[in-house]
Image (cartoon, rainbow, N blue to C red):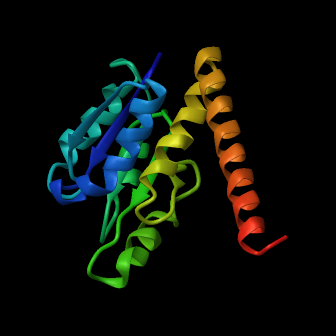
Amino acid sequence: MLKVAIVLGSKSDFDKVRPAIEIFDKFGVQYEARILSAHRTPEEAGEFARSARNNGFGAIIAVAGKAAHLGGVLAAATTLPVVALPVSTSFLDGLDSVLSILPMPSGVPVAVMGVNAGANAALFCVRLLAASDAKLTEKYEKYVDEMRRKTLADDKELQKLLGK
């Protein structure tokens, strides 16, 4: 199975990555996490992205806040899917990060998750990898069914609370 790279723009972004790591652990998806900055280590970030496919990666999650250019820098240097995870900041609570990522030029696509949505970034990567991995597809389908069952159980509990 292909791995997922989690590239953080800075160490302070790690707490936003924990939900993604939990998802990968749950699904048995291997990952590697690195701290590489679009602005402070652009050569290293580009080289990481250029060699990612040959190093067994199937997708990259780019985690960054403020001027969140990391996703674009990585996407420009690879043909792998890049998923941007904007993180909240003290300036505009992460909206600045989203607005830094969204206007990618034609030909350099980057999928953008919600602010601090590490679990969804990981689940998006699981779906990408599952497209060519039957065992991972089965695990994901089971996960979806578990969510469905939990939601229906919650609804049943709510109806009891409401006396219906």
Left or right, 52 with respect to 10, comes to right
Residue in view at x 45 percent, y 20 percent: 2
User: Which residue lies most toward the bottom here?
Assistant: 92
Q: Is residue 42 above or below residue 44?
A: below
Q: Is residue 69 above or below residue 161?
A: above
Is residue 8 something that shows in the picture? yes
Quick one: 129 or 43, which is closer to the camera?
A: 129
Q: Position of residue 9 (x, y in %)?
A: 24, 54
Residue in view at x 31 percent, y 66 percent: 65
Q: Position of residue 149 (x, y in %)?
A: 71, 44
Q: Quadrant of residue 140?
A: top right
Quick one: 22 or 35, which is closer to the camera?
A: 22
Is residue 73 something that shows in the picture? no
The C terminus lies in quadrant: bottom right
Residue in view at x 32 percent, y 25 percent: 51
Q: Is residue 43 above or below residue 151?
A: above
Q: Quadrant of residue 161?
A: bottom right
Left or right, 23 with respect to 137, comes to left
Quick one: 160 or 31, which is closer to the camera?
A: 160
Q: Position of residue 47 (x, y in %)?
A: 25, 34
Left or right, 61 with respect to 141, comes to left
Q: Quadrant of residue 155?
A: bottom right
Quick one: 138 or 60, which is closer to the camera?
A: 138
Residue in view at x 32 percent, y 48 percent: 18
